Image (tube, rainbow, N blue to C red):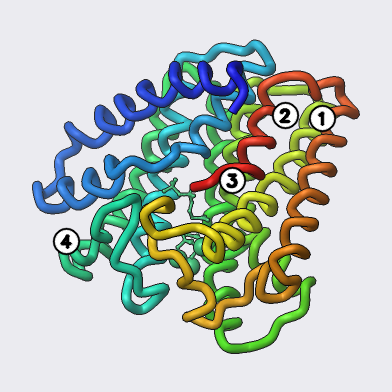
């Protein structure tokens, strides 16, 4: 990782951890529910999505007191998606972020409800912010809702599930990945652009960058499922083959998947180059996304 990105992450990750904790610790909810929410939230994810929102704002040289909170709400929704993704009815995993999955510790019912609570609170937290205009808050809430829901992540998870045991073509696989992972990851990039209220040309470039990074992120997740170990990943490796999932390696071979990853990176880079944003943090972040080992 470059020095620029390393120091950015070292500065911002602790702030995200603190914000997540502060946002949940005082809510008026039954203690077992709060425990289950905090267990997964604080299990130590990479925090890529909130970091991305903040990285975009840094690149744009724009400061907003509520940015950390907006960024943290994305991590809440991401964490909810992982809790549900791991349930027996879905991927049936018992290891996540290096720890037993939520339902293993708290039982299925509380795990489902902790997920429900994380996703629903995220929208209310944005609605209450004081330092972002009502118009931009509605924009954030609308885009978050569609990225996370039936037209985004939830829809993608359904296609992923329906595709198990079937042989899909590349176009169908791309549709799954763009939705189940790309949509929320892309939103995390666009949230920074929305907060900064960027002009149309920059928004279009960042949208293109976000689309390709979102897809690249899941391609690398598929590659790591094949090449990584459970210890390294903090989640069960080799799971996709066992579950007969359609993945980039399963359809294109591992070499083909790596080539496609590079192709997506190149397109993301080009989008930045078009608006002269190809020398800073967002390129470093793209490098990290495509080369990460966990
Ligand atoms: C894993 O996401 C699930 C996918 C959408 C591929 P991350 O790799 O960002 O997981 P954490 O948050 O670091 O645990
Ligand atoms: C997850 O995809 C996408 C989500 C919306 C959570 P995966 O099922 O591949 O994620 P991991 O590998 O379990 O983290
Ligand atoms: Mg899954
Ligand atoms: Mg899974
Ligand atoms: Mg995976």
Mark 3 → mark 4, Cα distance in angstroms:
27 Å
Specify few, some or many for label 4: CA neighbours under 10 Å numbering under 14, 14-19, or 20 or more.
Answer: some
SS class, disc 3:
helix
Q: Is residue 142 visible?
A: no
Badge nearest the viewer, 3 or 4: 4
Q: Earlier in the sequence, mark 2 or mark 3?
A: 3
The residue carrying mark 1 is: 272
Badge nearest the viewer, 2 or 3: 2
The residue carrying mark 3 is: 185
Mark 1 → mark 3, Cα distance in angstroms:
17 Å
Q: Quadrant of the N terminus?
A: top right
Mark 2 → mark 3, Cα distance in angstroms:
16 Å
SS class, disc 4:
helix
Q: Earlier in the sequence, mark 1 or mark 4?
A: 4
Distance from mark 3 CB to nearest ligand 1 atom below 8 Å: yes
Q: Residue at x 87, y 36 (%)?
A: 270
Q: Position of residue 276 (x, y in %)?
A: 86, 20
Mark 2 → mark 1, Cα distance in angstroms:
8 Å
In depth, the one of 105 and 155 nearer the eye is: 105
Q: Earlier in the sequence, mark 2 or mark 1?
A: 1
Q: Residue at x 75, y 71 (%)?
A: 252
The residue carrying mark 4 is: 105
In the image, taking residue 289 as reference, residue 126 lies left or right, namely left
In the figure, 286 relative to 279: above or below? below
């Amino acid at each position: 990782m470059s020095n620029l990105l390393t120091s950015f992450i070292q500065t911002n990750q602790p702030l995200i951890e603190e914000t997540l904790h502060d946002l949940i610790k005082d809510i008026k909810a039954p203690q077992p529910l709060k425990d289950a929410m905090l267990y997964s939230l604080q299990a130590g994810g990479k925090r890529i999505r909130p970091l991305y929102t903040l990285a975009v704002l840094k690149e744009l040289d724009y400061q907003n007191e509520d940015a950390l909170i907006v960024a943290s709400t994305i991590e809440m929704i991401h964490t909810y998606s992982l809790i549900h993704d791991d349930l027996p009815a879905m991927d049936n995993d018992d290891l996540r972020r290096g720890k037993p999955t939520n339902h293993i510790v708290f039982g299925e019912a509380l795990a489902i409800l902790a997920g429900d609570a994380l996703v629903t609170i995220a929208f209310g937290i944005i609605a209450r912010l004081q330092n972002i205009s009502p118009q931009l808050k509605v924009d954030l809430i609308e885009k978050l809702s569609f990225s996370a829901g039936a037209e985004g992540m939830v829809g993608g998870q359904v296609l992923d599930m329906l595709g198990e045991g079937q042989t899909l073509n590349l176009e169908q696989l791309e549709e799954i990945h763009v939705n189940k992972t790309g949509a929320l990851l892309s939103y995390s990039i666009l949230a920074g652009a929305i907060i900064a209220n960027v002009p149309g040309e920059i928004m279009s470039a960042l949208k293109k960058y976000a689309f390709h990074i979102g897809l690249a992120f899941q391609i690398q997740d598929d590659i790591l499922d094949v090449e990584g170990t459970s210890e390294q990943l903090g989640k069960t490796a080799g799971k996709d083959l066992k579950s007969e999932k359609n993945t980039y390696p399963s359809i294109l071979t591992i070499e083909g998947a790596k080539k496609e990853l590079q192709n997506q990176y190149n397109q993301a880079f080009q989008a930045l180059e078009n608006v002269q944003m190809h020398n800073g943090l967002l390129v470093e972040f793209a490098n990290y996304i495509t080369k990460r080992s966990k």
